[in-house]
Image (spheres, helix red, strand yellow):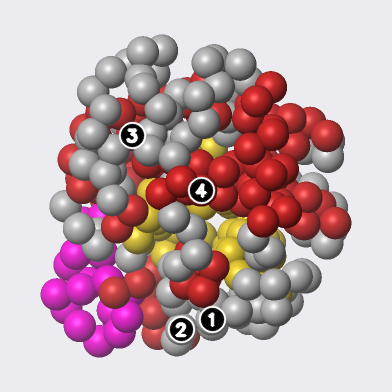
């Protein structure tokens, strides 16, 4: 999936399926509210833990069907015409449910929301629904992380970087998920440095036993350090995987070793290490 716009945000034409809001931010909330009535979905939340600090750093919102069905069961029903509305509705519902479940009540914890870059046609307009939802629930925008998978990356890197710059200008944090799954991530870093990168789980698996993966992991760790980007190691399943990255100075972890995603509720962290 790609977004081939070359225009600046102020001149960009709507992405396929996006409403013609004409720059009127008020119309964005109509799109988000409308889709929630047409497509029933919910969220599971999985913690990202800060092991040295012994605390939860963030909760990632993972879309699910109304009875906990897989994300694929929901995404398969999203067509070109509803992609924009789905993206808007997901942001609002992820915020509302996180607040309803008390995920952020301890203070300092963040909410990580996945978004579809090809559904954003004017970043400064499309972000208004999220801003309104955060203000309504009394959330600081700095407690929201927008992340996108490298596999979801649009081919037009400068356009994607422009989206992230606008989100940062609004006060949100930004992240690249599944970093290392392809070549686009390195190319993107030349245009924009996000607040976080999440190392792809294929590079994490059995890293404590495989020298080649260790060499790649150390290179990504050094790259993140030089660019001033926080690194999250995701998909951690074994103590050996955890211990390798702890020894390399990584603090942030996500995976089944600590907690599986909790559907419509607060996940319990099983092991701080």
Q: Earlier in the sequence, mark 4 or mark 2?
A: 4
* Residue named by callout 1: 256
Left/right placement of residue 261 relative to residue 8 reads right
> How far is disc 4 from disc 2 in space, using C-alphas?
35 Å
Disc 1, SS: loop
The mark that comes first in sequence, 3 or 1, is 3
- Where is residue 125 shown, x and y percent of the image? 55, 22
Between disc 2 and disc 3, the foreground one is 3
Can you tell which of label 4 and label 2 is closer to the viewer?
Answer: 4
The tag earlier along the polypeptide, 1 or 2, is: 2
Earlier-in-chain disc, 2 versus 3? 3
The residue labelled by disc 3 is 160
Q: Position of residue 260 (x, y in %)?
A: 60, 79
- Viewer-proximal residue among 107 and 53: 107
Q: Are marks 1 and 2 in contact (CB under 8 Å)?
A: yes
When asked about the image quadrant of residue 2, the answer is top left
Q: Is residue 178 left or right of residue 171?
A: left
As drawn, the label of residue 237 is 2
Q: Which residue position is annotated with label 4?
A: 82
Q: Residue at x 42, y 65 (%)?
A: 233
Select label 3 or label 4 by which is in front: 4
The image quadrant that residue 64 belongs to is bottom right
For the point 35% across and 60% down, which residue is it? Answer: 178
Q: Which residue is at a point 46% across and 46% down the rendered structure image?
A: 81
Is residue 121 visible in the rendered image? The answer is: yes
């Amino acid at each position: 999936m790609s977004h081939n716009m070359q225009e600046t945000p102020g001149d960009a034409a709507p992405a396929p399926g996006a409403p013609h809001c004409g720059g009127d931010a008020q119309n964005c909330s109509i799109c988000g509210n409308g889709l929630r009535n047409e497509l029933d979905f919910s969220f599971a939340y999985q913690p990202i833990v800060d092991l040295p600090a012994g605390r939860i750093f963030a909760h990632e919102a993972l879309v699910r069907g109304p009875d906990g069905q897989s994300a694929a069961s929901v995404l398969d029903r999203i067509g070109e015409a509803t992609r924009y509305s789905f993206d808007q509705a997901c942001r609002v519902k992820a915020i509302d449910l996180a607040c309803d479940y008390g995920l952020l009540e301890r203070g300092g914890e963040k909410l990580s929301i996945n978004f579809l870059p090809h559904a954003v046609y004017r970043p400064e307009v499309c972000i208004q629904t999220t801003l309104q939802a955060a203000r309504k629930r009394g959330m600081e925008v700095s407690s929201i992380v927008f992340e996108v998978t490298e596999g979801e990356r649009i081919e037009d890197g400068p356009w994607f970087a422009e989206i992230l710059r606008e989100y940062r200008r609004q006060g949100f944090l930004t992240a690249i998920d599944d970093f290392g799954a392809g070549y686009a991530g390195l190319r993107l870093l030349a245009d924009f440095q996000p607040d976080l990168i999440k190392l792809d789980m294929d590079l994490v698996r059995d890293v404590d036993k495989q020298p080649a993966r260790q060499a790649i992991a150390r290179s990504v760790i050094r790259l993140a350090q030089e660019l001033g980007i926080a690194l999250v190691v995701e998909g951690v399943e074994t103590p050996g995987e955890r211990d390798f990255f702890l020894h390399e100075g990584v603090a942030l972890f996500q995976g089944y070793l600590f907690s599986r995603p909790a559907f419509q509720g607060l996940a319990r962290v099983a092991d701080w290490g």
